[in-house]
Every structure is written in C-alpha cells, then in structure tokens.
Image: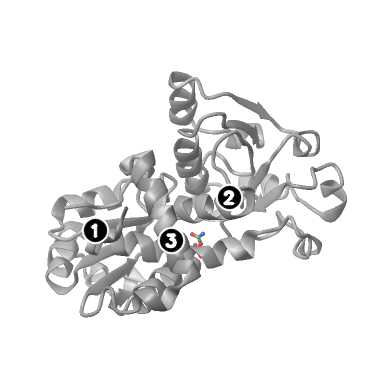
Amino acid sequence: MKSLINTLDFSVKEQDELLALANRMAASPKDYNELLKGRIMASLFFEPSTRTRLSFESAMLRLGGRVIGFSDGSLSSTAKGESLSDTIRMVSHYADCIVIRHSKEGAAQVAQTHASVPVINAGDGGREHPTQTLTDLMTILKVKNRLDNLTVGCVGDLKFGRTVHSLVKNIGRYPGVRFLFVSPGELRIPAFLRTYLDELRIPYEESSHMEAALGLMDVLYMTRVQRERFFNEEEYIRLKDMFILNSQKLENAGKELAILHPLPRVNEIAYDVDDDPRAVYFDQAGYGVFARMALLAWLLDGKELG
Ligand code: CP
C-alpha cells in the first residue's frame, strides 16, 4: 500500500511521472472528474491550514470523490484523550485515504503504522511537508521548464521550515542543482540537512545577506519565520523581520528569477512585489490543487501514472 510520508518516498522517475500527470490534469481537469467517484478522503488537520487542507479537499472533489474530516483537532475525540493511533485505526474504516497535518514531528509516520489505507503527510511539525514540495516542483517546472541546473535560494526560517527541508532534499536529487541558504545564524538549515547535502555532494553556501545573493539565484524560495515553532516570543520578535523582500531589493535580481513562497506570508514579502511578473507564489498555491489531484489519483488509482 502506497503512502506519502517523506519527500523521498517517490523515486525521481515516479515523481516526474506524477508531475506530468498533474500537468495533464491542469490542462484538462474535466477529463478526470469521475476518476475517484465513490472514494472518500479523510482530512485530519490537527494544526491550522488554508492552502493544504482546501486544495486537498478541492482536489478530491474535482476527481469526483468525497471528503470527511475536521480542521481543528480540538473538536475531535483527541480532546477527550484519544490517542493518534486509535484515531487512525477508526478513520481507516471510514475513508479510502487519510491526509494528516499535525504539530508533532513524526506524527504522519505514526499514522501510517496504524492505518489500513494510504496516508499522506500534510505537514508534521517542523520536519517535512512533501505535498508542498510537489506543488513547488510543479511551479518551478512551469516557470523554468526544468528541475535540473538551477541555483535555488532559500531565505528565512530554514531551521523550522518544513517546506524548505522537503524541497531541498527533493530537488537536490536533480543534476546541477545548487543552493544558497540565507538566514539568521539562529535559523540556519539543521544539521540533518547539511549532512544529507554533504553526503550527496550537493553544493550549497550559507549567508545572512539576502541582497548580495539575489542576483545569483534562478529560484528564490522565501519563507516565513514561524511564530508557532518558537519557545521564546522575544526571540521570535527579534528574528521575524530580518529578511523582507521588496521591489527595491529586487532590482539586484535577475529578470528570469522565479519568486516562490509556500505561504502564508506575514512581513517577509512586501505587497509591492505581488505585481512583479517574477512573483509566482499565488500561481504556486493554485498548482497545489493539481499536484494533489495527481497524488490522490496515484495513491487510489495507480494505473493513471505513466
Ligand atoms: N503552504 C501551506 O502549507 O499553507 P497552509 O498552512 O495554509 O496549508
């Protein structure tokens, strides 16, 4: 039984096929509107979400399926003390797949252990967010027409940023990809990611100067400093506005730069950037529907791939 818990659960070949399917779905969504008729997706969100939850639900509905679930774990029997493993055992009887977001790192893996249906990790704490990566890769492919030979700049909270962790591990598998990491020293990429990159000899540089790095990037992946991951409010306030992208700073960047952000943004991208043709973060959020349609089709109707 297939699931998606970690961003490397797909081979590059499988992923390329999945992204091709996502593009076919985006080009002609009506062709797929009965593919998952009669199937049910359970959407279990123990942590807040706008894009991931609603794009998954939209994806399942667009494939002809139906959705059950909750958007607030405190309204489930978790509030009465039910364990995650018991919740998952129950929901496995009610749905054909489970999409789970949880604040605890490793929660999706625990869910998979106890599920009898496919499980999709929609973000587990500060660890991974593999379906955001599918969305990111689909966006980069649309804009750059390739996933190889790119200089990818990641800016902001690289320590707790699960979207960065998944994207870096994943796109780092494509030849010729290098990374420029820009963050405050306190929010550097974690040791596990440095070890991963070092072992695979994937080149990267770290700095705390965004403006100087902008001109070197093909892709700029901005991220939010995540208040919810900090134990210390003072530390969050000190770090939150260290990197703010605005139109003036973009004068240093290449004309072909693609600016991505998993969203939500707070202050890190000024609103005057939104009209810049290089800003693709709202399109990126839209591609999330098709990336997730392809994933659901792959998990629940595997013959659609290839
Ligand atoms: N990108 C993302 O995960 O957004 P949400 O938290 O709104 O789902």
Task: From the top left corner, tell me how far across and down residue 130 is, in percent.
Answer: 40, 50
Q: Which residue is drawn at 31% across and 64% down?
A: 296
Residue identifier under label 2: 140
Amino acid tagged 3: Ala
Rounded to the nearest angstrom, the CA distance separating label 2 from label 3 is 13 Å
Give neighbour class at mark 3: few <14, some 14-19, many 20+ (Cα, 10 Å): many
Q: Is mark 3 on a helix, strand or loop?
A: helix
Residue identifier under label 3: 22
Amino acid tagged 1: Gly
Q: Identify the mark nearer the N-term, 2 or 3.
A: 3
Say the numbered circle drawn on residue 302.
1
Q: In which quarter of the image is residue 9?
A: top left
Ligand 1 has an atom within 8 Å of the beta carbon of the residue at disc 2: no
Rounded to the nearest angstrom, the CA distance separating label 3 from label 1 is 14 Å
Comparing 153 with 109, the one in front is 153
Q: Confirm or deny contact between disc 3 and disc 1 (CB under 8 A).
A: no
- Left or right? Give the position of 124 relative to 149: left
Can I make out residue 226 in this image? no
Comparing 263 with 8, the one in front is 8
Comparing 127 with 301, the one in front is 301
Task: From the top left corner, tell me how far across and down residue 227 is, in percent.
Answer: 56, 54
